[in-house]
Amino acid sequence: MSSTYGTLFKISTFGESHCPGVGAVVDGVPPRLRITPEQLQVQLDRRRPGQNKLGTQRKESDKIQILSGVENNLSLGTPIALLVANTDQRPGDYSSMRDIPRPSHADFTYTMKYGINASSGGGRASARETIARVAGGAIAEIFLTTKYGIEIIAWVSSVGNIDAPAVDMDNITRTLVDQNDVRCPDNVSAAAMEDEIEKATAAKDSIGGIITCVCRNIPAGWGEPAFNRLEAALAQAMLSIPAAKAFEIGSGFGGTRQRGSVHNDPFVRKQDRLGTSSNNSGGVQGGISNGEPVYFRVGFKPTATIGHPQRTATYAGEETILAAKGRHDPCVVQRAIPIVEGMAALVLADMALMQQARLG
Amino acid sequence: MSSTYGTLFKISTFGESHCPGVGAVVDGVPPRLRITPEQLQVQLDRRRPGQNKLGTQRKESDKIQILSGVENNLSLGTPIALLVANTDQRPGDYSSMRDIPRPSHADFTYTMKYGINASSGGGRASARETIARVAGGAIAEIFLTTKYGIEIIAWVSSVGNIDAPAVDMDNITRTLVDQNDVRCPDNVSAAAMEDEIEKATAAKDSIGGIITCVCRNIPAGWGEPAFNRLEAALAQAMLSIPAAKAFEIGSGFGGTRQRGSVHNDPFVRKQDRLGTSSNNSGGVQGGISNGEPVYFRVGFKPTATIGHPQRTATYAGEETILAAKGRHDPCVVQRAIPIVEGMAALVLADMALMQQARLG
Amino acid sequence: MSSTYGTLFKISTFGESHCPGVGAVVDGVPPRLRITPEQLQVQLDRRRPGQNKLGTQRKESDKIQILSGVENNLSLGTPIALLVANTDQRPGDYSSMRDIPRPSHADFTYTMKYGINASSGGGRASARETIARVAGGAIAEIFLTTKYGIEIIAWVSSVGNIDAPAVDMDNITRTLVDQNDVRCPDNVSAAAMEDEIEKATAAKDSIGGIITCVCRNIPAGWGEPAFNRLEAALAQAMLSIPAAKAFEIGSGFGGTRQRGSVHNDPFVRKQDRLGTSSNNSGGVQGGISNGEPVYFRVGFKPTATIGHPQRTATYAGEETILAAKGRHDPCVVQRAIPIVEGMAALVLADMALMQQARLG
Amino acid sequence: MSSTYGTLFKISTFGESHCPGVGAVVDGVPPRLRITPEQLQVQLDRRRPGQNKLGTQRKESDKIQILSGVENNLSLGTPIALLVANTDQRPGDYSSMRDIPRPSHADFTYTMKYGINASSGGGRASARETIARVAGGAIAEIFLTTKYGIEIIAWVSSVGNIDAPAVDMDNITRTLVDQNDVRCPDNVSAAAMEDEIEKATAAKDSIGGIITCVCRNIPAGWGEPAFNRLEAALAQAMLSIPAAKAFEIGSGFGGTRQRGSVHNDPFVRKQDRLGTSSNNSGGVQGGISNGEPVYFRVGFKPTATIGHPQRTATYAGEETILAAKGRHDPCVVQRAIPIVEGMAALVLADMALMQQARLG
């Protein structure tokens, strides 16, 4: 009942792993924006499976169709429907898992919730559901960039125990991020991360990781107290991504260890505005943007579906060994980059419209 | 525009620090529940300022009034309005801060957002706003306990660099939590934490900390994919609490460093249900509860308002030194315990009703 | 679960007939609006019971308190909580009706829905619930008047079979409406209507009536297709008022009998805008305002609670005779005028903010 | 921003007249319902253009595709996406209307609202938008029929000045309704109505009409006070249909002329429940269903687009004569029957889930 996100800039997603297609209806897109399928395809191609050696070999072209709401490459202000066909369906891969719920996967909980499950197991918990977020997020980003010059850039900051050094958040670009397959802008760390992923792959195992994301040029004043504070909305959006289990903004958990006199961000004059000389707040104070870059980190657990044999139980409670089949990513973070960016864009577009409503 | 939380079990809060009162309207409470002011007062008293030496000396009795929706101590199914008067208002304390926004506080962002600000500075970012959450959460908890036997217990797991050892999540109780002022169930750690807070107080400074919360007896099947997955809803709820900057469920950020074969929670038969032998998932898989305890951690930054002199700037951008007046907590975590519990209850009550709607 | 109305300009109401008080939280009110209790009291006094000989003699001063969100008579942009105490409670009046649901009243349906009922019978179906709408609507009206110069005027256009002649919608004012007790701007019809009401009163009976409302100076472009078209939102708002059973906008049911060539409103140049020479559309085309006055009619059934003996049945299905006690209005329309105006204002304020969000 | 309807049983529609397709995402459909495209097609075929001599000759097969949420003809509990391709697009028909907004049509207001307009003129105000409502409503109806045995039947009760006699609401069926092209179950009236429509067609004109709808077997207790009272929700749903301008439930406007002693519905024992001997309430009291049939009437204005020459003005305000081209229905009521039924089903399904949530 919660496949719609947003109050004004609203996305309603649909689609499982093995149905005819996945997509979304995006409502509330301001009129007269220039929107083309090619623009949306860029982010979809960054999410697409089979891009490189690091991920699943499932082959999907993931070509986006715009079904409504855009005419002559201009938004009409009416709902924009988006559709991507599922072409490389192999439900047979899942047949052996009908009786054995995959550990830490959605097989079991979907069955408990709905009393039925899609042939692919976890139903909407499939990575394919995120296609709709990426496409819808790309539309949100067009709005944010066109109207506010906002830039959203995410990158992989750790894989397993490999941590990349801090990134220059003022100057990071998607080009810098995309210079290697794992999407870590530090090439030395990237090589180690790719090695880590390949080792996991070789062991038919998986590995977790962390994504950091920065959003630049957000005006001061965005975010809706009390319950849709900017960090609360971002936390919801990020934790709604499959496999995400942790979120922190600004100094996050690390900041809990500091004193206020160290942690507080002093105000300083910055050109035409009041800024802060440090940014432990991550650009948000009292739930509202302060004009500094908003940055946050999202933790992803290791993929649940692994070929490595696991001791577990059947639905009936019988002990068994499961070695999962199917084509799954050993690590999700490099493909999750455009998903994190897309969800951030959806949050910010909604916040932008809320504040526009207020200012009139 | 976002002072309402929930789809079915819904709370709408109101009130600033220095207006006549703070409170909430709680809609969607199932009828025929036994609800008394005394039950709500228990949690309010745990949140109340001036309880002990660790926090602000602002004196508020925080007596709750139930204005509607309950007759003869039974809920009518209609909206329950709750009101707590603000009695110890001293707006004068804030007069010196009219020209100088407090660093890392909501003064600046509220002014940027609304073009006006309450005399107390951060307006709704005040800790008094959380009274409504605690009272509304207490009602949610009555529903969850009565109908499902759910137990929600939060405690302080760190203050600054003082970390308490792991807690036995199956047996922790509020009585164990409340045996010391800092609400850490390990008395040795608690003493060190209190010492840490007193040192910060002496230095007119503040310190951050982390709260851990466990929710037991949640049935399998709660949580609403895609955007209101259980961990997403909890993350939003927790990050909407003033000063919260980080959230992780289950293994959280730590789990990102593990391999799937280690991290996955194997299924095992448990009495009348299928359970898991470990709980790195934190009781949630694919965004839906699996029947195991749901636990999570919330990081709180050090209080922004400190008496310690800080170099900062006026609204006009002039450099200045600010030593804030007013009566503020040097550490928020011990008083935030019932807030975390209340927000968890509000999330779970909403999820419960959603699933009840589905099952019919 | 539906005591909240609105997407951006949002009201959440609470209160039954015999609890400590009734009121509302109004969220999304733009900041820096001048709002005083006296302004709200004007409309509350028009709704208040005991104003004149036509209605119930229940005496309530209905004094409004603003609990939050306003400081120094300026809105802060935060939720505005409103409270009116219930002072003249006489639950004893209802004791004889515990076993016999009043025909066409909410006693029976509330009991069926909630399995419990307030001592006053219909719970939230009480006319006192509408206080919150009037007070919240008065705030909405301040916004609409201040920013857009919008005027909302309702009047009684029929009581029973007494129909007032058509009113000059361009020039009708609240002063003209209030020149008699029944609030019909035609004094001859008003006298006949008052006579009709007094006859019903004498017979311990009740009588229905119709209210017409016009909203002037609404800019073109308000209304949100598909499901919140302007007429759809108004219809919902009006039919949510107790005793309302019918709604029509513009030519309404009468227009269904016409041909398009007669019914269509031709466009003509009007000063600085394109207007229409007739207004069968009631100012709305395709669900969106066109700049002409928006007008509509709302039908109210005769009050269900009457002293006249009625043959009916007990909850247990036994035949019986009921002659209801209590102090009830024989006709609701004259007191419903500010309720209709208030609900119209709430709808329009929400639409205004939606369009402001879009235009940015 | 309002293309989504419903709180739990939720539909989000998309599509203009001349884009690749129209459709909807239906979220909140309970799992394990038997749903086939053929079932949905039945109602779509009743709405389809070109069915008979009475309406537009635009030829659309309107074949429904289910894109997600259903597997092996069983609902999964996940969003069901529906798509109907637009095949008979002739945007050229509209080229002459680019400069002249059609009187009483959405051309002008869409342009004012969005600053851009689809090539077909009124964009989402197109009758094709209602396809999504019919298909989504058919799913809602499957749920209501399967679980509650609810029956929803609408018919044409007037065209222009031709009024059909009262219908036996307890026994009316869709078969009886569909025995003639105009869908009036009284064949004599139907012949006169068809004659009326043909005369309007011959005159290149259009004519309005009224639809009556009855919903049987709704349990007592549905409807959500205060703002989503059952009649309020129905009124919104019906007035959101293109060309609808009036709504009344039960005795409606006629009831306003009666005294309470005549209008009240006395309670009587009916088999296993308490019923009423008359039904002026239309099955709803205090906004909540009482177990009697819910019936209401919806008034539709004459179609705005007519070939008959009309004196009007261009967007620039120049006087002109417009004789519209394109293929439009001279009367919408016979094709609106499944739309009214579909919207009623969407309202009731949402209400059902709300009450299920409450009862648990």
Image (cartoon, coloured by chain):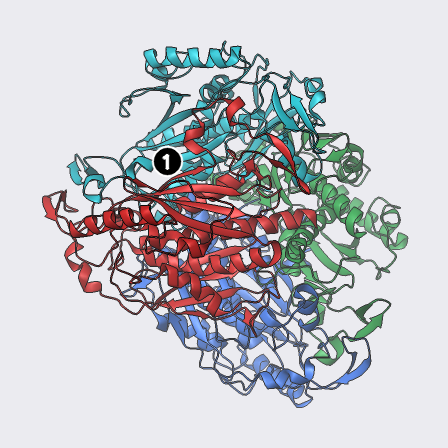
Chain colours: A red, B cyan, C green, D blue
* Residue at image point 49% right, 10% down: B52
Give above or below for B75 relative to C269.
Answer: above
Q: Percent position (x, y) of residue B11? A: 53, 36
Q: Is residue D316 above or below residue B18?
A: below
Note whether residue C315 is visible.
Answer: no
Which residue is nearer to you in this view: A6 or A138? Answer: A138
On the rendered image, what quadrant is the C terminus of chain C found in? bottom right
Q: B161 or D131: which is nearer to us?
A: B161
Q: Confirm whether residue D292 shows in the render.
A: yes
The amino acid type of the residue labelled 1 equals Glu
The image quarter in which residue B266 lies: top left
**Who is closer to the viewer here, D41 or D67?**
D67
Q: Residue furthest bottom?
A: D202
Mark 1 crowd level (few <14, some 14–19, many ≥20, 10 Å Cα):
many
Q: Quadrant of residue D28?
A: bottom left
In this picture, is C64 found above or below C188?
Answer: above
Residue B153 vs residue D47, the one in the foreground: B153
Q: Tell me residue C344's x, y (percent).
A: 71, 51
> x, y percentage for residue D318?
82, 79
Q: What residue do we see at 88% from left, 57% from top?
A: C171
Residue D186 screen position, x and y as percent: 54, 77
SS category of the residue bearing label 1: strand
Q: Which residue is mark 1?
A: B248
Q: Is residue C312 left or right of residue D217?
A: right
Q: In the visual, does C151 lie left or right of D213? A: right
Q: Chain of mark 1?
A: B
